């Protein structure tokens, strides 16, 4: 499956915000994007000023959200998959595509990281399949990939 990455727009913020899940996460909170719109930011900024992308699949359906948080110690990923695609074995391709996009669009990062709650077993397994290693912390797990 191929994915297309587009800077997130407000109608996509509203659609992603409506997604509901049955697993560990129940919903995606898009409050920072609403605040960004109210400030008049163009492009919209997410939590901590992250850069957000709407990700479309081959059928031009909104497949997911990919966020890049540029920090001194690496680039953190934030992501969400449209609930209609959960459980179909597509997360590895989505995560890998997000990292490939990062490498094409933004050069010079040394580490890619993801913070995930330790109870999010499904997410941890998906990240490990993509080559992330993990480090246990108090409430969450830090997964990282070094170049």
Image (tube, rainbow, N blue to C red):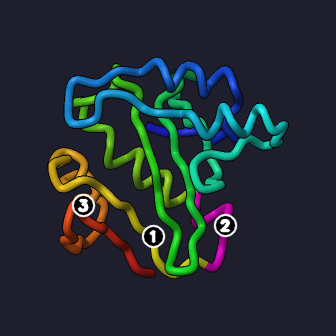
For residue 124, above or below residue 79: below
Label 2 vs 3, first from the N-terminus: 2
- Please name the residue that numbered disc 2 is placed on: 106
Q: Position of residue 15 (x, y in %)?
A: 55, 19
Q: Residues within 10 Å of mark 2 (few under 14, many from 20)?
A: few
Name the N-terminal-most of marks 3 and 1. 1
Nearer to the camera, 47 or 135:
47
User: Which of 68/146 is in front?
Assistant: 68
Q: CA distance from mark 2 to mark 3?
A: 27 Å
Neighbor class of circle 1 (other Cα within 10 Å; few <14, some 14-19, many 20+) is many
Q: Quadrant of the C terminus?
A: bottom left
Residue 112 tag number: 1
Relative side of 17 to 46, left or right: left
Q: Is residue 76 above or below residue 41?
A: below
- Tell me which corner region of the image, top left, top right, bottom left or bottom right, holds residue 107: bottom right
In the rendered image, residue 48, in percent from the top left (x then y), is placed at 59, 56
Q: Where, quadrant-wise, is the N terminus in this rendering?
A: top left
- What's the mark number on residue 140? 3
- What secondary structure is marked by label 2? loop
Count up the numbered dots: 3
Tell whether position 105 is magenta: yes
- Which of discs 3 and 1 lies nearer the camera? The answer is 3
State the separation of the CA atoms marked 3 and 1: 16 Å
The magenta segment: 102-108
* Residue depicted at x 24% and y 64%: 141
Instruction: Provide the secondary structure element on which disc 3 rests.
Output: strand
């Amino acid at each position: 499956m191929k994915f297309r990455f587009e800077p997130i727009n407000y109608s996509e913020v509203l659609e992603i915000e409506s997604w509901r899940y049955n697993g560990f996460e129940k919903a995606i909170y898009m409050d920072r994007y609403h605040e960004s719109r109210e400030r008049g930011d163009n492009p919209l900024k997410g939590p901590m000023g992250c850069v957000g992308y709407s990700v479309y699949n081959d059928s031009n359906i909104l497949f997911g959200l990919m966020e890049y948080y540029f920090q001194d110690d690496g680039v953190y990923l934030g992501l969400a998959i449209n609930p209609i695609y959960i459980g179909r074995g597509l997360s590895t391709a989505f995560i890998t595509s997000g990292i490939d996009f990062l490498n094409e669009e933004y050069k010079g990062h040394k580490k890619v990281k993801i913070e995930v709650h330790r109870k999010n077993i499904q997410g941890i397994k998906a990240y490990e399949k993509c080559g992330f290693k993990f480090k246990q912390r108090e409430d969450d797990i830090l997964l990282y990939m070094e170049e």
